[in-house]
Image (cartoon, rainbow, N blue to C red):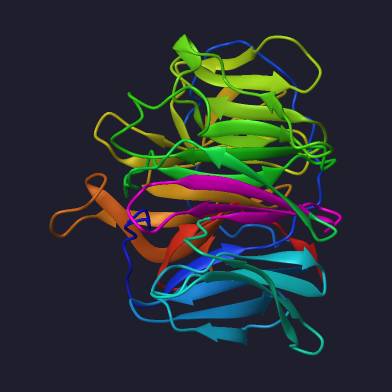
Amino acid sequence: MSRPLVRLQPGVIILIGLLSACSAPASGGTSPTANASLSASGTPAPASGYRVVYTASTASAGEIFLYDSASSTPQQLASLSTGAPAEARFISPQKVAYVDNPNAGPAKIISLELATRATSTEVTANGYVPAFAYSHDGSLLAYLVHDTSGTGKASLHLRRSGQETTLSLNSVPGRGIGRDDEVRLEFAPDDKYLLMVDTYVGNQGQAPQTGQFLVIRSADNTVAFVPPSGISANATMATWARHKDRLYYRDAVGVRTWDAGVAGLGTLATGLHWYDPAAAADDRWLAFTLIDSNSVPHVRLYDLQRNQLVATGALARSHPIFISGDTIWYLEEQACASECLGGPSQTSGRVLAYSLNSKGETALPFTDVHSLSQLSVASS
């Protein structure tokens, strides 16, 4: 079986949405230096209106919800009879899509019109679909399929105008539940490139250098970039900039940059071992999780103008996402009462908002939230 082992708790919520491409970080090659910790009190400035699609999952079922910042009452969009977290996202401001990975039978990617609640099955796949992504213009769909018969076979599928291309990947013998395990599909801001990250715990040292981290050209489905062998072996934890085709990712050196059409790699920060990176919409910041020497996670910011690391507070936090140019959301972490998988702390279920302007945080009206995908915002 190649389905991931996922830590499920009652009411697990995954927040996801639609993002406009809007960030052009500057390059840099300096090692990060930490600023003094910022205050973790106060009330952050509210973000402009937004809408969020999220899934609430238990061990036996899942529900898709739409949350509007102007309302405190989420609207239920769909109910699924599966314990696997159902990835969901906007295709357009009025149309969403989500994955249904049932415990038995084929997986499906289903679209839903918000105005009418009408649904349509876009994809039926014989296997497990751990991730999918639509291009910003909605014309191209990419999705991963993992075989569930025990072979570990994995494939990347790209569909446009009813025509589909399938790329065979290296086998994935199993997935872990540690912090280094990542699956991500993400289109570049202009949709010319697709990032695919499919790394897994326990086998990275033996993994081939191709097949688990690729950048694909959307026009002809050819490979545009593979991290070089050696120091870039086991590259992971990647994200696009928001204004240009610049990719950030982590390897043995630190955080590297790849720019489409430019030969060679850049180095943003040597020795930086980040997790969960997310780029801001104002071409200024990167947010990410950093694990300290006691294995406790903290959210940090990288100032791309000054090429330096900035702390957001001393308390344990993880999985940052930008809700606006000056506001991030992240998860509270707490010490494990008993044995934890992946470290001495685990998410508490609380989501907090942090203001880059006031340098303070406040709790959001969500509970039992244990995973945040990189959030994208549809203006409302």
Q: Quadrant of residue 147?
A: bottom left
Q: Which residue is outermost to the left?
A: 338
Q: Indicate whether residue 99 is drawn in magenta.
A: no
Residue 71 position within the rendered picture, expressed as x and y whole percent measured from the top left: 69, 83
Residue 337 relative to residue 248: left or right: left
Q: Is residue 365 visible?
A: no
Q: Nearer the viewer, residue 255 or 164?
A: 164
Residue plotted at (33% across, 76% down)? 59
Q: Nearer the viewer, residue 6 or 149?
A: 149
Q: Quadrant of residue 216?
A: top right
Q: Nearer the viewer, residue 12 or 210?
A: 210
Residue plotted at (46% across, 67% down)? 85
Q: Which residues are magenta?
A: 131-159
Residue plotted at (48% across, 49% down)? 319
Residue 156 relative to residue 340: left or right: right
Quadrant in which the C terminus appears: bottom right
Residue 291 position within the rendered picture, expressed as x and y whole percent measured from the top left: 36, 35
Q: Nearer the viewer, residue 194 or 92?
A: 194
Residue 73 position within the rendered picture, expressed as x and y whole percent measured from the top left: 62, 86
Quadrant in which the N terminus appears: bottom left
